[in-house]
Image (cartoon, grey):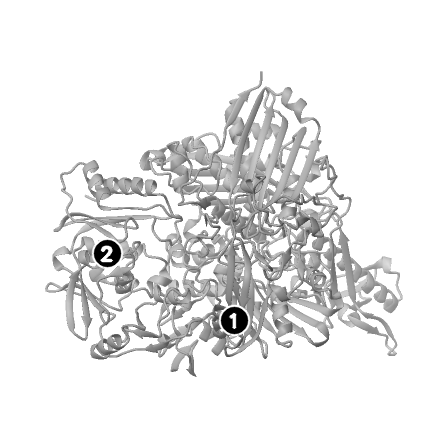
Amino acid sequence: MKIKLTVNGLSYERDCAEHRTLLRFLREDLGLTGTKEGCGMGECGACTVIMDGRAVNSCMVLAVEADGAVIHTIEGEANGPSLSDIQKAFEKHHAVQCGFCTPGMVMSVKELLARNSKPDAEEVKEAVEGNFCRCTGYVQIVEAVAELAGSGDKGGLEHV
Amino acid sequence: MLYEFRYLAPRTKAELAKVLADHAEDGKYLAGGTDLLPNIRNGLMKPAWVIDGKKLAGAQDIAFSQADGLVIGSAATINDVLRSKDARERYPVLCACAHELASHQIRNRATVAGNVVNASPCSDMAPALLCLGASAVLSSAAGERRVPFSEFFAGVKKTVLKPGEWLERIEVPAASAGARGAYKKLKRIAGHDLGIVGVLMVKGPMGLRFGVSSAAPTPVLVPSVAESDAPEAAVAEVLAAVSPISDVRGSKEYREHMIGVYVRRLLAEVK
Amino acid sequence: MFDDLSPAELRFVGKEAGRPDMTEKLTGEAGFVSDMILPGMLHAQVKKSPHARARIKRIDTAKAAALPGVRAIVTGEELNYHIGLYIVDKYILAKGEVRHYGEAVAAVAAETLEQARAAVEAIEVEYEPLTPVLHHMDALKPDAPLVHPELGTYSYMAAAFTPKPGTNVANHTKLRKGDVDKGFEESAYVVEREYSCPSVQHVPMETHVAVVQWGKGDKVSIWTSAQSPFTVRNLFCHAFGLSHAQVRVQIPYVGGGFGGKAGIGVEPLCAVLSRKAGGKPVKFQASREEEFSLLPCRSALTYRIKTGVAEDGRILAQHMTMYWDSGAYADYAVNVTRASGYSASGPYEIPNAWIDAYTIYTNKPYGTAYRGFGHVEFHWAIERHMELVAAAIGMDPLAFRLKNALKPGSKTLTGETILASTGDVVKCIEEAARRVKYGELTAEERAREKATGWKIGKGVAALQKAPAMPPFTATAVILKMNEDGSVLVNLALTDYGQGTYASIRQIVAERLGFPLEKVKVAFENDTDRDPYDWQTVASKGLLLSGNAAILAAEDLLKNAYAVAAEALHANPRDLGHDGERVFLRHHPDHGVKFSAMAVGYAMPNGNGIGGPLIGVGRYIAQGLSHLNKETGEGNPALDWTFGAHGMVVEVNEETGEYRVLKIASIYDVGRAINPDIVRGQAIGGMMQGLGTAICEGYIYDQQGRLLNPSFTDNKIPTAKDLPLEIECAVVETPQIDGPYGARGVGEHSMISVAAALGNAIQKATGAEITHMPMRFEDVWRAIVKKEPIDNWITKSPVGSCRSAPELRRHE
C-alpha cells in the first residue's frame, strides 16, 4: 500500500507492506535507525515516537496506520547543528549511559513538555514510566527534566 | 509483524459492516492495536486481514448529552477519556480506572472499546463500565443492538460479539453522572503492570457497587451492596461473587485477602 | 599508580566532566549492531525447544529449505564444534539432546525476517521428552537424571575448577581456613540458616545481536553487541580451529550488557549460517523472549550458613555451603562459584572458615556472568544472616557488623591481610547508618507512621567485591597523536554505558596536561586495531586500563621530549610542556609545538627526526596468585571495593505492601575520577538491585517451561519505582596502585540492596524473609507467619520452601 507521511518535517511517500510496523518502516525503509526495538510488544518504550502530537510505541503501530500522519523521531530533535534544550539538559545531567533507551526517552519527554511545560517530579515519572532504562536508574533523567521545568538543581555525588 | 496480513481501512459504516462480514473468518478488527498486534506477533492470532475501524467519521469522539449520557466512540483512546472534560467532571470513576491502564504511550493508542472487546479478566475499564451501568452498541450489516456490559462478557477473552459485529460506541447513562468512587489496583511494581487484583467501588444514583478485575474469568460486577451493610458483609458479598485463581502473579489466598482489604479501604475512603 | 595529589592540584580527575559519547547517543547517530545493514545481508531465526529435556529423534528441514528466500539451514547434527569458557560443554545448536527450554535446535538464514520465520515454522522436529531435573537441590540427589552424562570427557581449566563426572556437579570450590570445629566448640552461640534467590535476567535494552560474515579463505568478520572483543575472538577461534589472524571482531555502540554479553553469544550461530550461505553476512537479533530463555541468565542460589559467635559478639567460625544453579551449561557459572567462594562471608573477619561451593547443572536456561558475579546473590544471604544472627544473640545488628567488619590487620578468607589502604568498610557502614538515622525514628517518621498506619523500619547492609579475574589479567592502551596535536586513545576495554571512557579521557588529559577537548577516546572497538584487553567485566576496567592509560601518556611524553630535545638541542631533563608545546623550562620561549612533532619533526633544513608520536602503556595485575584448590588460600584480589546501604522502608502489615522511603549508599572508591559517572553507576546499580529485591525472578512450571518469558510477567523497575529519597556518597581511601587512587565500582551498587531491604522490612514488622524477591505477597506471608510460597518452580504456584531455622545455644 502506498503511504505518505511527514517525518521530522520532511515528506515521504513509499510503498509499504501492510503488515510492517511503523518502527520497522522508520528504521528500514527511511533509514531512521535512531528509534530502537527493545521488546516488540509495547512494554519497554524504546520505540517511542511522537505521532500527531502523541507519544506512542511505534512497534504497536502499523506503518499503514501512519498514512497522513506527522511523526517526530529523535533524528529531528536537534536544531540543525545545535542540540535541543532537552538534549542539552540530558547531556548536562548525565542522563544517558548506554544510549539505547535514549531516543524513546527523549521523545516521551518532548511530548510531556509540549503539553505541560512545568511538570513536577511525579508528572515526569508518569510520563517516562513506559520507557525502561536499565542503566541510569532514572534519577539523572528526572533531574534533567526538572531543570527544563525550571525547578531543581543538578544532583551530585557527595564525599564523606 | 513477522506474520503477514492485508489491511483495510473502511471509511463508512456500511463499508465496515460489509468488510467485517466478508472477513468474519479470516479478519480481525483493529482498534488501538495494543492487544491485537502483540497477539499477532506472538502467533496467537493469524488473521489474513486486519480491518481498521478508526477512519469512520466520529469514531474518535467523546461527547455528553442528557439524552445519551457519555458516548465514547469506537476509536476513542484511554488518554482521550482522561483528556475529556465531560469524562473528568461527570464520570471521575471512569478516569480513575483509565489512569491505571498500562503506560502513557499505550494509553495514547489503546481504545476503551478495544479494551473491553479484548475482554481480558484484567481489564481496567470494565469495572467502571459495569458499575456505571454502561452499554455497548454493537453494529453490523444487520443493524445495531445494545448490550449492557453486565451481559457483555462471556468468558476469558470472550464477549457476546457475533461474527461481523463491531463495538461502535459505548454509552454511559446520564443518570450515572456524578457517581463517586475509587479504583484500587494491586500491582507487582509501581510502574505499569497487569493487575494482581483490582477493585472499583462506585457510589451514586445506582447505589453502592463494586467492580472487580483479575479475580474471575471475566470482570465482575457486584451490583447492589446495601449501603448500611457492615464492611464485613460487603467483603463477603464481593468475595462470593469472584473466583480468583493462583498464578504466577499471586496466589488465590492473597488475592482474596487483598480484595477484602480493598473493599474495606474503599468503604472507609469513599464517602 | 597513585600520586598523592590533592584535589586542588588536579585539573580534570575528580572534577565534573562530560561524557564523550553523549551527542551521538542523544541524536540517534550512534550506531548499534542492531542498526546494521550490510549488502546482501541475510536474516536469521532459530527453532527453539519447547522441552526442558528431550532426545532429538528427527529434524526434517526439507519443507523449510523449499520456501522462498531461504539461503541456509543448520542443525546441530552437522556441527561438531564445542564451546565453553571454562568447561567445554556446549554445542552451537543442540545435538542429540536438548537441555533446556528455549534451547536452539536449528537455525535459518533467509532474505527477509518474515521468510526466516516462516522457514523456522516449517522445520519439523520430533522429540522424545525426558524427565528434566529442575531444582538444583534435586539435581544433587543420587537418582537425579544427569544433564551432562559425558562430563568426564570435556576439557576444562584444571587450574581453577573441579568438575565431578557422573554427577550434576560442574565444579566444587573449596576453602578451608583455620579450624572450624574448634571455632564452633569455643562459640557461645551457633546459628544456622538457609537463604535462596532465583534466576534473573540482565535485561539489556538492546538484546543480543551479531552480524557475521564468513568470507572466502576462512576470513571471518564479526560485528557484535558484546563486552569483550578479544574473548569473542579467542573463544571463536578455539571453537572453529582458526588462527587469530583469520578473525576480526568489531564492537560499535552497545545497548547494555550487565555481564550477559561478557563472553561469546550468538556469533558462532551467525557464523555457521554465513558459511553455509556462501559467505553472505548473516544477522541474528534475539527477540526479547529469546533474550530471556535462549540467552543465558543469572544463576539461582541456595546458601546455607552456620555461624559460631563468642559471647562478646565476635564471629569465631563460619561454615558456608553454596549451591549454585548453573542451568544446562557451565559457561561463567563455575567461575561465579569460585569467585563467590573466596568472598563468601562478606566484608567480615572470619578466623575459622569452611566453604563448599558447588556449581550444579539443571535443565534450565543457563547462568552466565551477571553484574556482581555472584555477590548480589550471596550477599543477600550473608547480610540477612548477619541480621538474624544478631537478633538471635540479642545484639544490635549495626554493632554486630561493626564488631566483625574487616579492619586494617584483618585477614580475609584467603589469608590476604587488609591494609589501611585497602578501603574502609567501617566508615561506609557508619555513614550509611548515620544518613538514615539508623536505630531510631525521627519525629517526622513517627508522625508519618501515625498518619499512614504503615510501619517504618530501617536496615543496613554492607558489601565487598574484588574483580573476579585471572591473577595475571592484563591490558594495554595506545595513544596516538593527531597532526593537530590532539591525541587519540585506542583500547579494547569497551564502554557499553558505564562511562569508563569519560574517566579514561580525564586520566589521559590529566597526565598529559592537555585540555579535555584534545583527548579523544575512539569509541568502537576492533581486534584488528585495538591493543588487547581481557574483558570488560569485574569492575577492573578503570583500574587496569586507567593505569595503562597513565603509562601510555608517560610514554608519549617521553617520546615527544626525545624529539624536542633533539630539535631544541636540549637535555630532556630540563624540558617542560603545556597543552600546546614542549619547551626549555629555563628559557620558555625556546619550544616546539606538539603538532610540529606529531607525525615527525622537520628541521629547518628539511631533515626529518622522530616520527609519529605514539605512547604505549601496558599494565598487568601484580602480586596476585591462584588459589590453592584444597584450602582456597591465595591472593586473588586486584582491589577490594567496600560499601554499605542504609534503607528506610514503610510496610503495611495488613497486606505486605511496602515503599522504600530512603536509601543511602556509600562506597569507598579510592578516588571518584568522574563524580557524575560514579553517581550514575551507583543509582543505576541500586535500581537494578531493587528490581531483584522487589519483583524479578524466573518462574518455571513442573516441565521446566519458563512461565514469564517476557516483560508481561518479568517486570523490571520503572521511573515510578524510585525510592522517595536517594543519597550516594563516596569515601576516598586511595587505592595505592589505582590510577590517581581509584578503584572500580561498576558492580557494587547492586550488591546488598536486597538485603538492606529485607533487614528494614524485618525491623518494621518482624517478618523474617530468607528468599528473594520480596513480593508483597511474600512479605504478607512472612508477617502473618504463613508458609512461604516457593513458586519459582511451580506446580501451580503454591509449592513449599522451608528455611529450617536452627538456633541452639552451645552447651
Task: Determine the chain carrying the residue at label 1.
Answer: A
The residue sitting at 56% across, 27% down in the picture is C400
Q: Are marks 1 and 2 in contact (CB under 8 Å)?
A: no
Q: Which mark is residue B94?
A: 2
C222 in relation to B82, above or below: below
C78 in relation to B183, above or below: below
Same chain shared by disc 1 and disc 2:
no
- Left or right of residue C342, residue C717 in this image: left
- Left or right of residue C703, residue B225 in this image: left
Three-letter amino acid code at the position of disc 1: Ser
Q: Nearer the viewer, residue B99 or C510?
A: B99
Q: Position of residue C521 (x, y in %)?
A: 66, 64
Q: Nearer the viewer, residue B240 or C609?
A: B240
Q: Nearer the viewer, residue C47 or A81?
A: C47
Q: Position of residue C35 (x, y in %)?
A: 54, 70
Instruction: Mark yes or no: residue C172 visible.
Output: yes
Q: Position of residue B211 (x, y in %)?
A: 23, 50
Helix, strand or loop under label 1? loop
Q: Which mark is residue A82?
A: 1
Three-letter amino acid code at the position of disc 2: Leu
Q: Quadrant of the C terminus of chain C?
A: top right
Helix, strand or loop under label 2? helix
Marks 1, 2: nearer the viewer: 2
Mark pair 1, 2: CA separation = 44 Å
- Left or right of residue B193, residue B149 in this image: left
